[in-house]
Amino acid sequence: MTTRREPTARQLRLAVELRRLREAADLTARQAAALLGVNPVQISHIESGLSGVSEERLRRLASHYACTDSEFIDALAAMATDRTRGWWEEYRGLLPTSFLDLAELEHHATFLREVAILYVPGLLQTEDYARAVFSARVPELTPGELELRLRHRLRRQQLTVPYELLIHEAALRIRVGDKAAARAQLTKLVELSESDSLTLRVIPFDLDGFGRAASSMTYVGGPIPKLDTVVRDVPTGLAFIDSEAQLTAFRTRFRKVGDVALDPERSRDFISRLAKEL
């Protein structure tokens, strides 16, 4: 089987889950290889995402690992046999790999939940707002790099999965561009909030004791909860978080933030007022 030079985040997730299953069974890679009748190097390549795995081998491994969660095994098999070459592939070699991994993750998402503190999320940005965000990057992007990022971001916005956004008033008030761009962005949010797929709720400044505004997060639903993913911005790009303990913590964090956010109708009115103030 051909060895991959650069596995995608989705391929790495499958690899990580297979390694976790083996470790939960208290087997070494060498023992797993012996049970499967292959070279230990093949197990190493599968568990690092450098090689794919057939559905038949995956199910045999799951059986050797005494995994009885059929729903989980079916979901892993679907990941292993997926041959999707999405629109994001046209940007391979042109944009950082994390841009492509994010688009692929969103493509396979069953739902999205997001907490936004300082910026309107990319999935809801106007072209002028997105351009202003990319233009502020340090070091500066070349005109060609900026246009690539802009096209990629606007293409991501064609998602139709259920999307719940909790957005802080700070993100609504910070002007990444000029006043006209800010007004247009707020107007777009009001319009989008009417769609069936988006639930938008505002976290106002006028809220006592809100200590949860320190960090943004994007929670991406997988085919089953065990395969959910959290995406965080880090200094080096994007971090994809998938450990069960951290997923549980982020679910709780989102719920607690949601407990204090305005309801959708009041949020829509809130954003409309801000737009009129500009």
Image: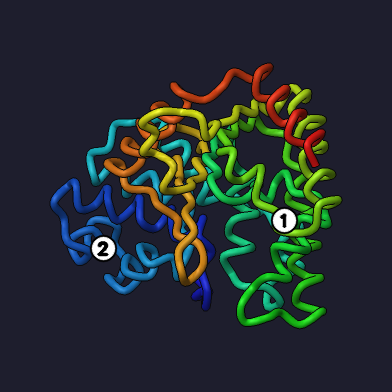
Q: For the view shown, which residue lies furthest in the front direction?
A: 277
Is 268 placed above or below 176 here? Answer: above
Please name the residue that numbered disc 1 is placed on: 86
- Label 1 Cα crowd, 10 Å radius (few <14 / some 14-19 / many 20+): few
User: Residue 30, position in %: x, y?
Assistant: 20, 66
Local SS, label 1: loop
Q: Reply above or below: 66 against 137.
A: above
Instruction: Classify mark 2: helix, strand or loop.
Output: helix
Q: Quadrant of the C terminus?
A: top right
Left or right relative to 198: residue 238: left
Q: Which mark is first along the chain, 1 or 2?
A: 2
Q: Dot 2 surroundings within 10 Å: few (below 14), some, or many (20 or more)? A: some
Check disc 1 and give the amino acid type. Gly
Residue at position x 55%, y 44% in the image? 116
The image shows residue 136 at horizontal and vertical percentages of 68, 70
User: Residue lying furthest left in this view?
Assistant: 26
- Identify which residue, 128 or 110, lies in the foreground: 128
Where, by quadrant of the figure, is residue 210 drawn? top left
Measured along the vertical axis of the image, is residue 221 above or below residue 50? Answer: above
Q: Residue 153 in the image: state x and y as whole percent.
A: 74, 57
The residue at 61%/46% (across/down) is 171
Residue at image mark 2: 33
Compute the Cα span from label 2 to label 1.
33 Å
Task: Name the residue: 65% across, 26% down.
Answer: 199
Residues 259 and 27: in front is: 259
Give residue 149's quadrant in the image.
bottom right
On the rendered structure, is 166 left or right of 156? left
Q: What residue type is labelled 2?
A: Ala
